[in-house]
Image (tube, rainbow, N blue to C red):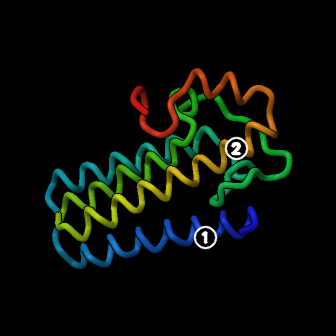
Amino acid sequence: MTSKIYSYFLVSLQFIFIALLVIQHGLHAPSSFACFIVFLGGGFGLYTLKCNTLSNFNITPEIKENASLITTGAYRYIRHPMYFSVLVMMFGVVVSKPSVLSLFVYVLLVVTLFLKAQKEEMLWMVESSKYKSYRQKTKRIIPFVL
């Protein structure tokens, strides 16, 4: 599978799993705790976007032409803060109406985002000599943990 096809495949899986979680949630009124988790993840995502430029941002795990390595803001702690944001928001959805199916789909989403992160990091290792030291100073997706 070519690099770009694999990237689009991972993005497609990501959106399918998010859609499945949201559809499975349905019109169920979430708890205050679930809403708090979703808003926390969304807020972190907005903070991340503030630290990045739209010309740098890419939904696929490909590096845009003339992209620069961002190491400030949320990127100071984790290399993939938008993936973290998505995981936190979708965890809030799972918590709002937990089931074996939603937990299974959430695990598939986690695996998909880790594969996207791995692909993107492989490309950055080739693209930037600074990326190797940046990798050593930061966690991949979960601040201070992983």
Q: Which residue is mark 2?
A: 122
Residue 143, image x and y in percent? 43, 31
Residue 32, image x and y in percent? 15, 54
Residue at 33% x, 51% y is 39
Question: Dot 1 lies on which element?
Answer: helix
Residue at 68% x, 22% y is 133
In the displayed structure, 116 sits above or below 128; it is: below
Count neighbours of disc 1 (C-alpha within 10 A) and say few if under 14, some if 14 to 19, many if 20 or more: some
Residue at the limit of the structure toward the right, as seen here? 66
Counting residues from the start of the chain, the first of labels 1 and 2 encountered is 1
Residue 26, image x and y in percent? 24, 78
| Quadrant for the C terminus in the image | top left
Q: Quadrant of residue 129?
A: top right
At label 2, which amino acid type do we have? Answer: Met
Count neighbours of disc 2 (C-alpha within 10 A) and say few if under 14, some if 14 to 19, many if 20 or more: few
Residue at 31% x, 54% y is 38
At label 1, which amino acid type do we have? Answer: Phe
In the displayed structure, 47 sits above or below 102; it is: above
| Quadrant for the N terminus in the image | bottom right
- The disc placed on residue 135 is none
In the image, is 22 to the left or to the right of 136?
left
Residue 132, image x and y in percent? 70, 27
Residue at 32% x, 70% y is 21
Q: Which residue is mark 1?
A: 9
Q: Closest to the observer: 114 or 21?
A: 114
Question: Dot 2 lies on which element?
Answer: helix
In the image, is 138 to the left or to the right of 145?
right
Label 1 to label 2: alpha-carbon separation: 17 Å
In the displayed structure, 124 sits above or below 77; it is: below
